[in-house]
Image (cartoon, helix red, strand yellow):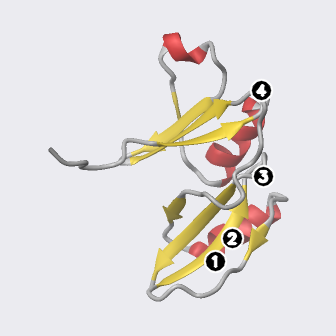
Amino acid sequence: MTVRSIDHVLLAMPAGREEEARAFYQGVLGIPELTKPANVAVRGGCWFGHNTLKVHLGVEKDFRPARKAHPAFVVSDVRAMARKVAAAGFRVAEDVPLEGYDRVFVDDPFGNRIELMQPV
């Protein structure tokens, strides 16, 4: 018996801000929205994904953004994506180099930290 893979990443968000989630995750990052099953759709939030990437945004009553814990998304052109994120008005921050990758950190509309990385 072993853990084989990750099915999805769940990030928290405040209630009632699904349109902002769609604008960022689908509009800026280009991750298509997925239809949530009816039994969990009533909770609010949004799901996004394609291929093996799945990101769920779930409503948290006493929301606080994740500032240290974060998902890391592999992108095809990290510098172009960083420019797109910045142009959309979201924070982009450099960090210490990580061997084998070019990477930046960005904030989603709710202040959650996300790493964007490209193998070099």
Kind of residue at badge 3: Gly
Query: Which residue lies under the disc numbered 1?
Result: 79
Query: Residues at badges 3 and 1 in contact (C-beta under 8 Å)?
Result: no
Query: Residues at badges 3 and 4 in contact (C-beta under 8 Å)?
Result: no
Disc 2 is placed on an element classified as helix
- The answer to which of 120 and 105 lies nearer the viewer is 105
C-alpha separation, residue under disc 3 versus residue under disc 4:
14 Å
Q: Residue furthest front?
A: 1
Query: Which residue lies under the disc numbered 2?
Result: 82
Placement of 76 over or under 46, stated as above or below: below
C-alpha separation, residue under disc 1 versus residue under disc 2:
5 Å
Query: Which residue lies under the disc numbered 4?
Result: 15
- Among the two numbered marks 4 and 2 on one chain, the one whose residue lies closer to the N terminus: 4
Would you call the spot at circle 3 few (<14 residues within 10 Å), some (14-19), or many (20 or more)?
Answer: some
Query: Residues at badges 1 and 2 in contact (C-beta under 8 Å)?
Result: yes
Residue 91, how many percent across, how many down? 80, 64
- Residue 12, numbered label: none
C-alpha separation, residue under disc 3 versus residue under disc 2:
16 Å
- Among the two numbered marks 3 and 2 on one chain, the one whose residue lies closer to the N terminus: 2
- Residue at image position (53%, 62%) is 72
Which numbered mark, 4 or 2, is in the foreground of this view?
A: 4
C-alpha separation, residue under disc 3 versus residue under disc 1:
20 Å
